[in-house]
Image: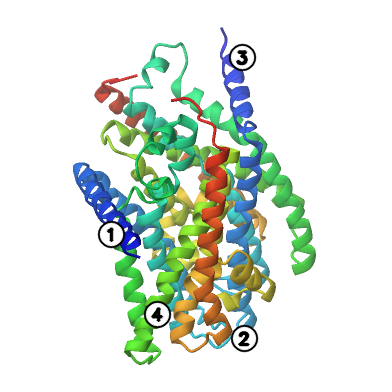
Amino acid sequence: MRGWLGTLRNYLMIYFLFIKNCFIAQMEYRTNFILGIAVEIAYLFAKLLYVVVVYETDLHIGSITPDGILMFVGTYTIMTGLYSGLFFPNFVRVSEYIRSGTLDLLMVKPISLQFLVSLRYIDLGMPIPNFIAGGTMVVISWNALNIPVTAWSLFSFLFYLGTALIITYCLMFIPALLSFWLVNTGGLAGIFYSIWDANNMPMPIYSRFIQRIGVYLLPFLVITNFAPMMVMNQLTPALAVWGAIVPIVLLVIVRFVWSRAIRNYNSASG
Amino acid sequence: MSAFPKYGRVFQLGVQSSLEYRFDFLFSLISAFFPILIQYYIWSAVYGRSESSEFFGYTYGQMVLYTITAAIVTKIVTTDIGQNVATEIKDGGLNKYLVQPVSFFALKLFTMLGQKIFFFSAMLCILLFTLVYLTGTYGIRIPLAHILLFMVSMVMSLLLNFLISYTLAAVAFILSEISYFFEMTGLFVIILSGGVFPIEVFGKTINKILDYLPFKYTIHFPANVINGRLSMDEAVQGIGMQFFWMIALLAFSRIVWRAGMKKYLGLGG
């Protein structure tokens, strides 16, 4: 147990160093840093159009009012910020590591290769607009829906955001993992981005069939639906449990596929 | 050497490079499908529960047709040419073209056309099949003349979008770190072109402004030609606007590029 805690502490320390290192690197090109934020604002603008359409057309999805939908869009926006800040900068690099043989170099470092490959880079600029806008949307809708602010409601909301983060890591890592076999997975990643966007709307808007797939088979819909559904009292106990199990199952699967992928890796050039 | 075989060869190379990763091509076809699905559900929910049969001036059938066409048109017309050219400016790759007896503009144009031709044809076939199916379902009649006009407007919007991209790429002469710049402008261009939602969503004032800018003529216009919202006159007029903007942007890009070339240092390469 102590050894395990020690390892965890070491990894947290290394992760902190990654953050510091990325921060310094990003501050070097400040224009680019600001442009990165501008890119996210552009994406945000596209998302806000959905909000405009929801309110303009007074869209109700089942029992969810426009204010309720706003909370889903807000959660989706926060999760997009987390994904683009923590994971995206790493996952886009993987196929390049494989193609150019940089992976050989990373392999010899005395820490977990998966950790290094999937968490080395952090973008600190991109999440800023998403956090501000998403957080604001959640707060506004939380108020408008008269959801009591209790320790339990806050905890359960944050808990499902946490599980969502792990699910995001696992699911969005898949195209990068497959690039060990397929080399060029840009198109597949494109599909995953578009599936990701399905979270822009509460899941009851989709047909039952799509919901089943999105919750059980490729659990994308768990990511931004469960946290708002929990505080709106719309999450059945069975689903609540499922939401807590999914991240563990996915982590195990990803770890398994990762080790297969590494065994399959033939050093290219480099 | 006359110009045709030269650029014809570039065109062929473009076609070949687009067929290099066939899986990737298939995937990008599939990824066009998802935004359509999401929007289809949104609009079905919107129109399904409301008494009103029109939102933003579109009937349900027109909106569904718009959504499908806009998504496909967006896929067809977007190019990464701006990004591509800008990288060449930044790390001096432009040098090798400057000493060759070719026009850089024509080179990029024919590469783009070559890369797109296969995708373009495949997408158009899919689109036409969908249209035949949907027009039956929603009882929308599309006259043959509109389909022909649509084809013309699509070719024009592909060229128009290329010109917008190419003009924006000249910014790379001034800014050095530009990868994000193109992502941002690319996205705004898509939003303003009606690639996310029909531009009527923005309200009357912004629409008035957009009427005079080139953007809506790349996605919003072709999509509206085919869903039957535009009369014959309006459609022809729109193609006139496309033509006007093509000439205007061609001239404008010449000016910006000439100015940019004076600043160009040709580092690296």
Amino acid type for the residue under numbered disc 4: Phe
Quadrant holding the N terminus of chain B? top right
Question: In front: mark 3 or mark 4?
Answer: 4
Quadrant holding the C terminus of chain B? top left
Q: Residues within 10 Å of mark 3 (few under 14, many from 20)?
A: few
Q: Which residue is mark 1?
A: A9
Q: Which comes before the other along the chain, label 2 or label 3?
A: 3
Q: How many marks?
A: 4
Q: Nearer the viewer, residue B65 or A18?
A: A18
Q: Report the Cα–Cα distance between label 3 and label 1.
A: 65 Å
Q: Quadrant of residue A52?
A: bottom left
User: Is the residue B119 above or below the residue A193 in the image?
Assistant: above
Q: Which residue is mark 2?
A: B51
Question: In front: mark 3 or mark 1?
Answer: 1
**Relative to B40, is A34 on the left or the right?**
left
Query: Mark 4, chain letter?
Result: A
Q: Report the Cα–Cα distance between label 3 and label 4.
A: 64 Å
Q: Which comes before the other along the chain, label 1 or label 4?
A: 1
Is mark 3 in CB contact (under 8 Å) with mark 4? Answer: no
Q: Which residue is mark 3?
A: B5
Question: In front: mark 1 or mark 2?
Answer: 1
* Secondary structure type for disc 3: helix
Amino acid type for the residue under numbered disc 2: Glu
* Residue at the spot 35% in from the left edge and 65% down from the top edge: A1
